[in-house]
Image (tube, rainbow, N blue to C red):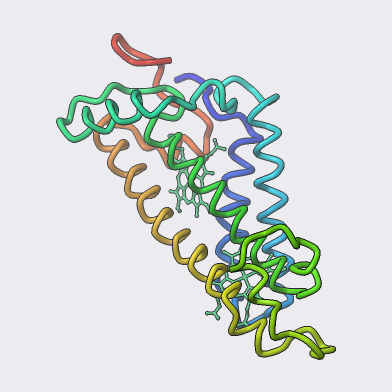
Amino acid sequence: MTRVWGPVVRLFHWALVVTFAIVWLTADELQRVHEIAGYVVAGLVAFRLVWGLFGSRYARFAQFLRGPATTLAYLGDMARGRERRYLGHNPAAAAMIVALLVTLSGTAFSGWLMEEPSRVAMLAGLPHIVTAAHADEEGDEAGYGEAETNGPLKEVHETLANLMLLLIALHVGGVVLASFRHHENLTRAMITGNKRAPGPGDIA
Ligand code: HEM
Ligand code: HEM
C-alpha cells in the first residue's frame, strides 16, 4: 500500500460531502442553516483551490489536470475497457473535480447574490439575467420580495443545484466503475488515504 490522499484532502472531501448534504436538505426548509452551510461549502472550495496549488503531491492540480485530448483518449479507453490505472485522480475524475468545484462555486455565489438584492446592484457589469432579478425589486424594503424568490436568479441557483446532483451521480458512478475495473475500493482509499502500490503499466 502507498499513501496517496493526505489528511487534508480526505478531511476536505468528507467535510464537503456532509456540508453539501446539509445545504441540500435545508434548502427552503431552514433558510438560515442553508445559507451558513452554503458559505461553508464556498469556504471549503476556496481552501481546496489554494491546496491544489501548494498542497501535497496528489492534491496538486498540476499533478492531475490533463488536457482535453488526454481526457478524451482516457474516456475512449474506458469505453473499450482498457484504461490504465492512475494512482492519483485519473483524467476523467480530474475533469469531474473541476466541474464539481466550478458548479459549487456558482451555486454558492448565486445564493449569496440572491439572499441580498443590493449585491446584484453592485455587479452592474454582469449580464441581464442577473440584474433582471433585481429589476422589479424597487421599493421592497425587506429585500426578501417576490422578485427575489421568483426571479431568474433563483432559477440560476436551482438549476446549478440540480446540475450538482447530476454531477454527483456521475462522480459516484465513476468511483464505483473505477473501483471494479481496478479491483480496489476507491471510497475506502478516500477514507484511509492508501492505495495499492503502482504495478507495471500504472501511472503514478
Ligand atoms: C458518498 C458519496 C461519495 C463518494 C463515495 C465519493 C468518493 C470519492 C472518491 C473515491 C474520490 C477520489 C476519486 C479518485 O480516485 O480519483 C473523490 C474525489 C472527490 N469528490 Fe467525492 N465522493 C462522494 C460524494 C461527493 C460529493 C457529494 C461531492 C461534492 C459535493 C464530492 C466531491 C469530490 C471532490 C471535489 C473530489 C476531489 C478530491 C480532492 O482531490 O480534493 N464527492 N470522491
Ligand atoms: C453550494 C451551495 C448551495 C446549494 C447546493 C444550494 C441549493 C439550493 C436549492 C436546491 C434551493 C432550492 C429550494 C427550492 O426548491 O425552492 C435553494 C434555494 C435558496 N438558496 Fe441555496 N444553495 C447553496 C448556497 C446558498 C447560499 C450561500 C445562499 C445565501 C447565502 C443560498 C440562498 C438560497 C435562497 C435565498 C434560496 C431560496 C429559498 C426560497 O425562497 O425558496 N443558497 N438553494
Q: Is residue 183 left or right of residue 117?
A: left
Q: Residue furthest right?
A: 141
| Nearer-the-camera pick, 97 or 107 | 107
| Nearer-the-camera pick, 201 or 158 | 158
Quadrant holding the C terminus = top left
Q: Position of residue 36 (x, y in %)?
A: 74, 66
Q: Is residue 176 left or right of residue 95?
A: left
Q: Residue at x 61, y 29 (%)?
A: 6
| Nearer-the-camera pick, 172 or 188 | 172
| Nearer-the-camera pick, 184 or 69 | 69
User: Is 14 rendered above or below residue 199?
Assistant: below
Q: Residue furthest top?
A: 200
Quadrant holding the N terminus = top left
Q: Residue furthest left?
A: 80
User: Is 63 rendered above or below residue 178?
Assistant: above
| The image quarter in which residue 75 lies | top left
Number of numbered labels in the structure image: 0
Q: Is residue 93 left or right of residue 50?
A: left
| The image quarter in which residue 140 lies | bottom right
Q: Residue at x 72, y 50 (%)?
A: 43
User: Is 135 rendered above or below residue 184?
Assistant: below
Q: Position of residue 51 (x, y in %)?
A: 68, 32
Q: Residue at x 72, y 66 (%)?
A: 112
User: Is 45 rendered above or below residue 39?
Assistant: above
Q: Position of residue 3 (x, y in %)?
A: 53, 22
Q: Position of residue 89 (x, y in %)?
A: 45, 30
